[in-house]
Amino acid sequence: MLSAKAKSILNSPDLVAERDAWFARLASHFDRTVRNRPFRLLGHVAGWDNTTLKYTAPELWMEHSLETLADMIANHTPSENDAGKFRPWCVEGWLYGVHFIDRIFGCNVYFTDGNWFNDYLPRPVGTLETPDLDNNETWILAKRAALAFVESGVKLPLLGTDVLSSTLNIAVNLFSEEILSAMLDNPDAARHDFLVINETLKAMRRWFVDNVPASQLQPSVSGYRTQPPGYGQLCGCTTYLLSAEQYAEFIAPLDNDLLGLHPHGGMIHLCGSHARHIPTFRDMPNVKSVQLNDRAAHDLRTHYEILRDDQLIYFEPCENMHLDLALSLTNNGDRLVIVG
């Protein structure tokens, strides 16, 4: 049971009001009432320690994580780094890392050398079956953790979901290059499996939307990709493997549909060379932001110039795209959420 001290801290009316004021400021960037000014973000996240509990006793893992977060808040001394920056308090655990969905589809998922990995499914493209979520051990563990968060009654923390990924990311995890070959040689088989994955991801996202308060629900990487309530996220990592035409034909309609499960659409995370897809991102009505780190951040100028005026850019500075350059390329940080 959560301690009285933790409950008091995690239900602090002052901290909840401060969080909601920051959400309102962030929303004003999304609705474009604030222009020519960057928004700054860097959250605090608990839940990464004692992760073994999440696989055996997710309710205890959540209790431990919330106690840890309360201690972090109690011991936090504001610094110059906090000034003018949204620093939300979050809980997140990443069951099976980025291979959470792979395991739900039946992959062998294992931990070695500090990371999670998976074996590909031993079945041909075009034969993927919808998993029985009601009886899926991995999905049940994730739901138990989320319900423990809700039932704790705490109002301040944000809950980052497990990695709900994207249709293309999961297809590549399940089938490797075979799914890419099928897009050329057997497109009907590829479309079948893409649809099975997308509908499964929609069902899981719908469960989170229906069961976690909108004011506290965030996608994975909750402290670094925090959006106003009602927004979702998908991972666009593997779009770098596709031509612009392939992405627009096979995947973009599914990604747009997936983000449409969230009341206000959402974000696409990008980390590689994806610039050829920017015109398609621009034309997807449910894409409200893109998140750029590492190689993707090098293309900041192209994103800024081609994306819609109402699409924000979450940006992490990197060696070849430092902060001063980013500000100069975006009219002093217009449409920019600076992370870190």
Image (cartoon, rainbow, N blue to C red):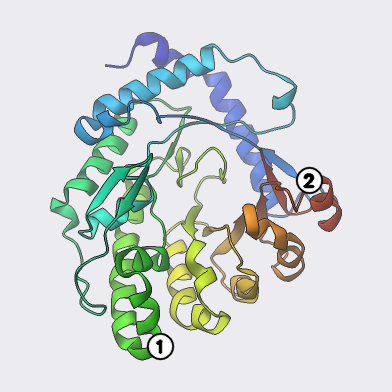
Tell me the CA gap for discs 1 and 2. 41 Å
Instruction: Tell me if mark 2 has few (under 14), some (14-19) or many (20+) residues whose alpha carbon lies within 10 angstroms of its own.
Output: some
Q: Residue furthest top?
A: 5
Residue 312 appears at what percent x and percent y? 67, 56
Image quadrant in which you'd find residue 276: bottom right
Camera-nearest residue between 176 and 198: 176
Q: Residue at x 70, y 65 (%)?
A: 303
SS at circle 1: helix
Image quadrant in which you'd find residue 62: top left
Q: Amino acid at mark 2?
A: Leu
Residue 236 shows in the view: no
Residue 1 shows in the view: yes
Q: Which residue is label 2 attached to?
A: 323
> How many callouts does the rendering have?
2
* Among numbered discs 1 and 2, the one appearing first in the sequence: 1
Q: Which part of the image, by quadrant, shows the N terminus?
A: top left
Q: Residue at x 31, y 38 (%)?
A: 146
Q: Which residue is label 1 attached to?
A: 184
Q: Residue at x 70, y 68 (%)?
A: 308
Residue 337 appears at what percent x and percent y? 69, 47
Camera-nearest residue between 18 and 227: 227
Which of label 1 and label 2 is nearer to you?
1
Q: Amino acid at mark 1?
A: Leu
Establish if 268 lies above or below 79: below
Residue 285 numbered mark, or none: none
